[in-house]
Amino acid sequence: MSSPAATSAYLGWLGAALATGGDSSSAVSGASVDAVLGYATGYDSHDIAPFVRSLRAVFDGEIALVVDDRADVRALLDEHDVRGLAAEVIEGWRPHAVMARFAAFDRYLTGRTDLRSVLLTDVRDVLFQKPPFSPQPAGLEVFVEGDRLGDHAFNMKYLRALVGESMAAALAPAPAICVGTVMGPREEVVRFCRLVLMLAAIPRSELGGAFGADQAACNIAVHMGLLEAEVCDNYGRVATIGLTPGNALGLKDSLVVNPDGSVSAIVHQHDRHPHLAAAMHERWGQGMQVRERVRTRPAGQRWRKLRDSLMRRLPELR
């Protein structure tokens, strides 16, 4: 008699998402092209412009963003030679975009043997100040945002959700890695995407596909040695500055300067600091009005959040 199969909404989505195949339309022999990939659904051209414009100022390689089908976004991408990708449409249950993006990245990178190194990155809160792939990464690189996972309630919440209280406590002394910027050779980035997606299958569907599951899965994968990665100190290739005191960050020649006086190629979470956000918009947001993002939840979304909160407290039949 055959064993019963594991079932969950997340696993159902994941099977469909990974079965769609890769995009090899641009593949050529030899790995000679670097690529920057981002997931920017839900954003308009105002949100995306600083990322695109600052990146194109220092990088002439491939840029591909998963975006909504909007005229203003298409015009911006066309102007700067950025490939716009459509989000995969899978009927039924869907995870949060922070998890869906790894399936999209895996789908795009599969078969792209022409790609050498790849940067997976957030979009709305990321800016570029120098060529991102200089120097070329020798292996997978992940980037620190804080000294200890245990000092960050958000990280610990999802670590506990994915692997339980005891394992989360064991990981608490490790540095907090930010999943918002990850870089490495194409094959290793694909492996990273798939590992994050599979680690998120451990808990209930509502947690595996939730905002924050990606961050926890990344830290688990690296700190438990499930893949090889160089854990890079903050303010090197990447400056992740959301937790950095604003008065420790300066501006010089329109560049964000780190507390130690250095200038990083990639700046993440600059929008957490009003003086930096204003300066970066003035430089890269030409012709676009600053708008406050008003976040409202339709009644259906509010109900789903309440339901998910309840389901997290109940066992899921597997």
Image: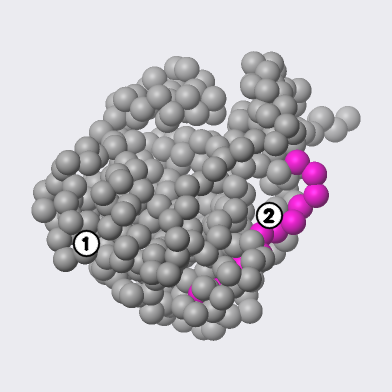
Q: Quarter of the image containing the N terminus?
A: top right
Closer to the camera, 278 or 243? Answer: 278
Rendered view: 116 above or below 275: below
Is 304 one of the magenta-colored residues? no
Rendered view: 110 above or below 165: below
In the rendered structure, which amino acid carries the disc numbered 2?
A: Leu
**Residue 255, numbered label:** 1
Q: Main secondary structure of the magenta part?
A: loop
What percent of the width, then of the height, locates residue 2? 85, 33
> Residue placed at 56% from the left, 52% from the top?
102
Residue pointed to by mark 2: 18
State left or right for residue 20 relative to residue 55.
right
Reading the chain from its start, which is encountered first: label 1 or label 2?
2
Asked whether residue 306 appears in the rendered view, the answer is: yes
Closer to the camera, 25 or 209? Answer: 209
Report crowding for label 1: few under 14, some 14 to 19, many 20 or more residues within 10 A (C-alpha): many
Q: CA distance from mark 1 to mark 2?
A: 40 Å
What percent of the width, then of the height, locates residue 166? 45, 17
- Occupied quadrant, residue 318: top right
> Residue placed at 51% from the left, 41% from the top?
214
In the rendered structure, which amino acid carries the disc numbered 1?
A: Leu
Is 91 one of the magenta-colored residues? yes
> Residue placed at 52% from the left, 73% from the top?
76
> Residue placed at 34% from the left, 24% from the top?
150
The label nearer to you, 1 versus 2, is 1
Report crowding for label 2: few under 14, some 14 to 19, many 20 or more residues within 10 A (C-alpha): some
Tell me the magenta residue range: 82-93
**Residue extending farthest left:** 261
State left or right for residue 194 relative to residue 51.
right
